[in-house]
Image (spheres, helix red, strand yellow):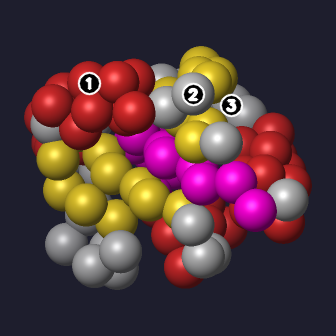
Amino acid sequence: MKLGILVNTDRHLDHITGITRAAVTKGHEVIIFTMDDGTKLLNNPDFCDLSTLQGVHMSFCRLSARRLEVATETLSGEIADGSQYNNAGMVHNADKLIVL
């Protein structure tokens, strides 16, 4: 199963990490797209470390990050600098979708 997680707030890091780790442990693929206030989590190593897990694909909305002045220059190459096209792709490809 492919699980999509749309992160549009910075209030649920524990839920995001817990759900993601549980899903990959069970062999599921997780697609995470971050936008709006959720891009603030890109400054948190616990959030960014999810990109190193087998089966996790992460991207963020460049426009949201710029608007909120979130530093993205030092992010791992595992986290794609993207747009709402990445969000649309996640929604299209995910079997289930969670919004946090």
Residue at image position (62%, 24%) is 96
Q: Is residue 99 above or below residue 78?
A: above
Label 1 and label 3: CA atoms lie apart by 23 Å
Residue linked to disc 1: 88
Residue 88 image point, x, y percent: 26, 24
Residue 37: x percent and y percent?
A: 43, 29
Q: Which residues are magenta?
A: 27-42
Q: Nearer the viewer, mark 3 or mark 2?
A: 2
Q: Position of residue 24 (x, y in %)?
A: 74, 62
Q: Which residue is mark 3?
A: 11
SS for tag 2? loop
81 and 64: which one is in front?
81
Is 2 included in the stretch rendered in magenta? Answer: no
Query: Element under label 1?
Result: helix
Residue 95, numbered label: 2
Mark identifier at residue 77: none
